[in-house]
Amino acid sequence: MTAAVVTGLGITAPNGLGTEEFWKATLAGESGLGPVTRFDAAQYPSRIAGEVPGYVAEDHIPSRLMPQTDHMTRLALTAADWALKDAGIDTEELPEYGIGVVTAASGGAVEFGQRELQNLWSKGKEYVSAYQSFAWFYAVNTGQISIRHKLRGPSGVLLTEQAGGIDAIGHARRHIRKGFPAVIAGGVDAAICPWGWVPQIASGLMSTVDDPTRAYLPFAAEASGYVPGEGGAILLVEEAGSAGARSAAHVYGEIAGYAATLDPAPGTGRPPGLRRAAENALADAGITPGDVDVVFADASGVPDLDRAEAQALTELFGPAGVPVTAPKTMTGRLLAGGAALDAATALLALRDGVIPPTAHVTAPAPEHTIDLVTEAREADLRTALVLARGHGGFNAALVVRRTA
Amino acid sequence: MRRVAITGLGVVAPGGVGVKEYWELLTAGRTATRRISFYDPSPFRSQVAAEVDFDPFAAGLSQQETRRLDRAAQFAVVSTREALADSGLEISALDPGRIGTAVGSAVGCTTSLEREYAVVSDGGRKWNVDHEYAVPELYRHFVPSSLAAEVGMAAGAEGPAAVVSTGCTSGLDSLGHAVELIREGTADVMIAGATEAPISPITSACFDAILATTPRNDTPESACRPFDKTRSGLVLGEGAAILVLEELESAKRRGAHIYAEISGFASRCNAYHMTGLKPEGLEMAEAIDAALAESQLAPESVDYVNAHGSGTKMNDRHETGAFKRSLGEHAYRTPVSSIKSMIGHSLGAIGSLEIAACALAMKHGVLPPTANLHEPDPELDLDYIPLVAREQQTDVVLSVGSGFGGFQSAMVLARPDRRTV
Amino acid sequence: MTTSTATVTLADLTRMLRESAGEEEGIDLDGDVIDTPFIDLGYDSLALLQVIGEIQRDYGISIPDDAVVDAETPGALLALINSGRTPAA
């Protein structure tokens, strides 16, 4: 069957704007978590976030797009520009309907939406922007990326909360298998505004610890919930033959396996679906757990969810049977952007033969029998497994493999 | 290649809850559009909508479900239960990991979100909204992926699940997504469809601001006028349709009633404008061509076209152009209708509601009409089935959709035993 | 009811266009644009709806819905605004 490979990466992350900045910081264990600056969070129980540093939208986004785009969409457009540039692809040389766009979303462009809700409720309907009809909605990143680069292929938007980045990449592979030469896929999200913050507080899963180095400690005994972040990654997924024919500058790796599952309804007594997603993805890639060199964990930071993930990993790989890492400790959980960034990070790890660390965590809690990588570790990496879970019961697993 | 059959339908639509009421409304050519009753519409330019008279308890939801679920989720869960019962499928006898879920929605839980926003912001007075007033369900409403989780869990499905959110093509695209999962072998059964409950002040304000909804407030029952010379915009609607899709051979083996096969699906982007359309309908035509090719059917085999027919000046011209481009001369011989004239435009849900209507049209040999089409637009010269339903057997049906973001989708339903080219 | 007697000038219009819809690269809005079609200035119907909304709010006037289609140039839009002068309802 046709292979889908990744030939371009675009990254906007709290610990680095641009792929190489991000990767350098990630290997060095440099975190992008800090006190919220995008709004005054003093009144809220949670006050730490991962914000993308030094992003000046006007440097990246044409003036005409500024009034009609949210911060989230600007970051997404920037990441997509970079992914295409990194791939060195001339979109006009591919068939007219050859390139699609598939992105993940969670709560939409929340800051834009909050502003317009406030206009409506405080001033009246005449004050609602003509752009609100699409600027806030879940499909906006796909639509704007498609328009900006004149991409007319099959496109989509998948919502599975934090698992969405993997689902978008898995879906891109479907299009490749159906004969489309390339798909722009991934997720970039941003919801660091009061109306994005309060629903997360209501979920009860956010950390309320104020120290940015102690707030998000997945698998640690002191785990206390998660810290949200903004940003994500866009990947250029390409049919291997097409990438070969144009002598693509990079082939980061192959999308070798993908699977998704839904947890059973509460109260059924059936096990959660993360392990099944991982097993199905490995089967899809035609490999066994022994072939996996590193796992990029979902790393919820919520003790019960950490326990469930550590247990699934132990069942699959045996106690400490595979290195496990969570570089998202340096970015926070990026909603629909997180799993896409993890996939990009896994590809960079394969490229350079090094496992990035889980920051701020010195050791996993004794109950978790996993080999948690807490300092960058060199290793001969051929295959990585990326796991993600989305609120409400979504599970997704992606296998990426080095091609050379 | 594995093929996909529709074996169950569940519907919540303006004019009635349940497939029976839905089909009665559509074939009677009755309209369910009316003056908005959910809130005072008088500040708005457009004051009409197709609302569902929905009593969650009468529809079978429990107290806890009613509290937990947004209106769109309520519609979806009720439709899921009807569809499963209709399919006769014994879910408990199946491997839950082989049952997937795909739910389309353009604007998610927007009604609940706006209601809760008004509370936490104290009527829009506070930028720093109050977390003390946030209800526990708020995060579930904030991420509309919850709609797929609710449907999947209501059905006992543990395979892949997702919300597909591609604006107003969501309801076609979610079904297209489900078809792919069955074909590739990831799932044997898909609980798939779409839901939307967008009738809320912020939605009214959005569509007002771009003059997309009709200002025809004096005669709400005839406000949505697709293909008519006097059409003046869309009428907002709400509702849900959930379908049970099965791998065709296994559906046949268990003796299931098969409404139709979903034989082809394709989607393209116009990469042109977030809300605008070019009159030629190039990308929609490309999607139609690809969906027919996937079905191994010639354009001449299409017996009926269920149009997007939103009733805006631009849309109706755009898709008429696309039909002519794809079907050629055959476009002039093919009946086309828009059920939005009767049930309004329920954004992300409408594509699935339209496919449900197509499946029923094939079952009953009746084509639903375009209501309110009294004065055909001279520029639009196809057979749009004005006013009155038409008896006609159909073997192949085409349905199309067009969405903000530039999405253009086409789906083909066919009798499984048709002749292919 | 608020009515303004001020006339909307081309400079007002281009300022509001810049604010509410941005500026197309390579277009000089300060040049002689009074008769240049909006489409050639890089503005689509959404941009016009946005700026018409702003004018209605700032000047307390009501501009008919058709303006977005009928007024193809800044000159035509200004003529429509400044001659109509219908107070907002």
Image: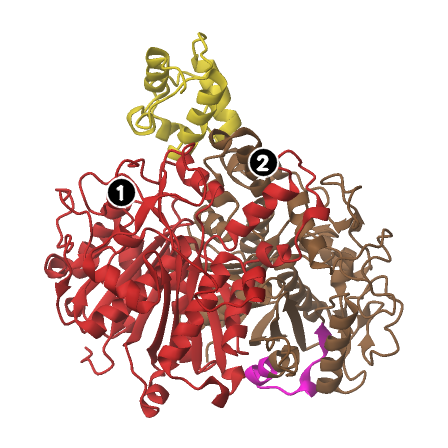
Chain colours: A brown, B red, C yellow
**Residue B207 falls left or right of residue B231:** right
Residue A250 visible: no
* Subunit that carries the residue with mark 1: B
User: Magenta segment: does it hold A219?
Assistant: no
Which residue in the structure is indicated by mark 1? Answer: B223
Residue B262, picture quadrant: bottom left
Q: Is residue A44 above or below residue A161?
A: above
Q: Residue at x 82, y 67 (%)?
A: A376
Give neighbour class at mark 2: few <14, some 14-19, many 20+ (Cα, 10 Å).
many
**Residue A373 falls left or right of residue B383:** right
User: Magenta segment: does it hold A284?
Assistant: yes
Where is residue A158? Give x, y as percent: 51, 62
Where is residue B198? Give x, y as percent: 45, 50
Where is residue B233? Give x, y as percent: 30, 41
Q: Residue at x 56, y 65 (%)?
A: B63
**Residue A211 falls left or right of residue A276:** right
Q: Residue A118 carries which label?
A: 2
Q: Quadrant of the C terminus of chain A?
A: bottom right
Nearer-the-camera pick, A170 or C33: A170
Q: From mark 1 to mark 2, how far is it between C-alphas?
A: 30 Å
Q: Is mark 2 on a helix, strand or loop?
A: helix
